[in-house]
Image: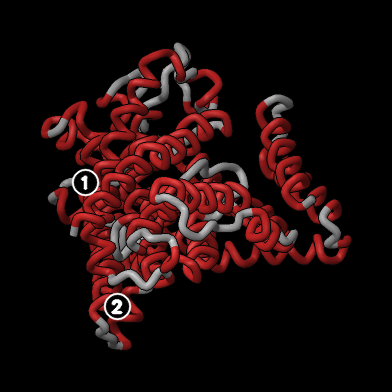
Amino acid sequence: MEILHSSIAIIAAIVLIIRFKVDPVISLVIACVYLGLASGQGADGTITQITGGFGDIMAEVGLLIGFGVLIGSLLHSMGTFRDLVGILARRVGGRLPYAMTAALATIFPSIYVDVQVVLAAPVARESAPAVDRRIGLPWLAGAIAIGIFAGYVFVVPGLAAVAVAGLMEVPLGTYLLYGAPIGLATALITTLLFRLLLTRGFWNVETDVEPDVLTEDGQPREETDDVLIATSAAALPLIVRLLPILVPLVFIASGAIAGVAGFSHPVLSFVADANIALFVGLLLAFVMVRRSLGADGVGTVLGAGFQTTGEILLITGVGGSLGAVISASGMAETLEDVFTASENASVFVSILLAWLIAAVLHFAIGSVSVGAITAAGILSPIVGSLGVDPVVIALAIASGAMFALHVNSNFFWMFSTLLDLTTKGTLKTLTLATSLGAVVSLPLVLVASLVAAAT
């Protein structure tokens, strides 16, 4: 019954938001209340999961969102994104989505997915008109989505990649050797296929983009300088103005690399924490703008960022509440009983089963990492009897775990708000791109199984 009630709750939330135009926060809370009561958690238990899930997500990503959005506001006031987009447009032009998805999948997998989207979203919004005035925004959104999660599940030291490799007892070097090419190929191929879908009239800017960011002719509005411009800060070299982004990335990546290498130091651990790293970036941006605009001016710029932050935090937190209620419903345990692995199955069946278990777990639970880790926990005890190299089963789990990231994920709501997309627009970009990526990567895993069998 947990599966049935969870499905009803998720479908109801989507219908309320898209068909009846109910605010996502209200719709998600309604879904939480229904699922909690229908699955037998009781009034007190339902409330506990709603509030606890909200608090847990805020503890995990609240500061990341706040610091990241404020950094974006300060960088915007210095014209940083405008100048960066100008350079990218001249250097790569219409190939920007491919450049961004490749970078996110291969260079930045050590960065938390929440940090990646917070930092990538402003670049995507501002560069969209230069890429394609009609489909630039959704194309870049899809490219960001698949780039982030292909790196997250396939490329060490992505969190899901490291976790699955560990549970399946696959050496990280072996996993990286197979996973990195699959992750990069998945990101690039998916970005290409996604563009082909968009060119066939799949995208409707009037229903898929928030109305307040559209111009009178229905086109996405280019970023405007509706906040004060820090003119002297804008005169700094672009590389200096990018330091509030680059420094946190270096700190976080250094910590991840040190962890893989088995090196530990208290100072490195401190500055490599994503919250501290982004706060350092915020301080750098604050100092640059403060010197140009003074105390009152920088306060005005930050004020605009605080308005955006509040909206993102509320809807992200409620998305976390739904995930907590689903977890408390016993969904994972029920799915473990539903899916049983058959020993001595063919290689294809074993890979498909691993993919399917991870896909269903992720779709139901709303977390890529939890779906992947749970699937690995189900399969790891019997992987030796499947007759397939464990790295192949691990890659199949990673592939399936990307499938259909949707409304029960707090990332879905972060993505939606940061990119100014409606719920329908986010389903058409984030959900479709991750689903397409999961399907694209499956045959690549089958190829990897042939390579592993031949070595």
Image quarter for residue 286?
bottom left
Residue 39, numbered label: none
Residue at label 1?
Answer: 234
Is residue 65 among what the camera can see? no
**Farthest right residue?**
43
Image quadrant containing the C terminus? bottom left
Q: Which residue is located at x 62 percent, y 56 percent?
A: 320
- Horizontally, residue 91 falls left or right of residue 286, namely left
Residue 415: image x %, image y %?
A: 48, 43
Look at discs 2 and 1 and give the one toward the viewer: 2
Mark 1 residue type: Ala
Residue 111: image x %, image y %?
A: 34, 61
The residues bearing labels 2 and 1 have C-alpha atoms spaced at a distance of 37 Å
- Horizontally, residue 317 falls left or right of residue 88, namely right
Instruction: Identify the element where label 1 is drawn.
Output: helix
Task: Say above or below: 110 vs 184.
Answer: below
Q: How is the image coloured?
A: secondary structure
Q: Which residue is located at x 30 percent, y 68 percent?
A: 252
Is residue 5 among what the camera can see? yes
Image quarter for residue 330?
bottom right
Task: Say above or below: 430 vs 50.
Answer: above
Toward the viewer: 141 or 194? 194
Q: Earlier in the sequence, mark 2 or mark 1?
A: 1
Task: Say above or below: 165 vs 269.
Answer: above
Toward the viewer: 345 or 54? 345
- Horizontally, residue 139 falls left or right of residue 47, namely left
Instruction: Identify the element where label 2 is drawn.
Output: helix
Q: Which residue is located at x 50 percent, y 60 percent?
A: 343
Residue 100: image x %, image y %?
A: 26, 42
Residue at label 2?
Answer: 259
Mark 2 residue type: Gly
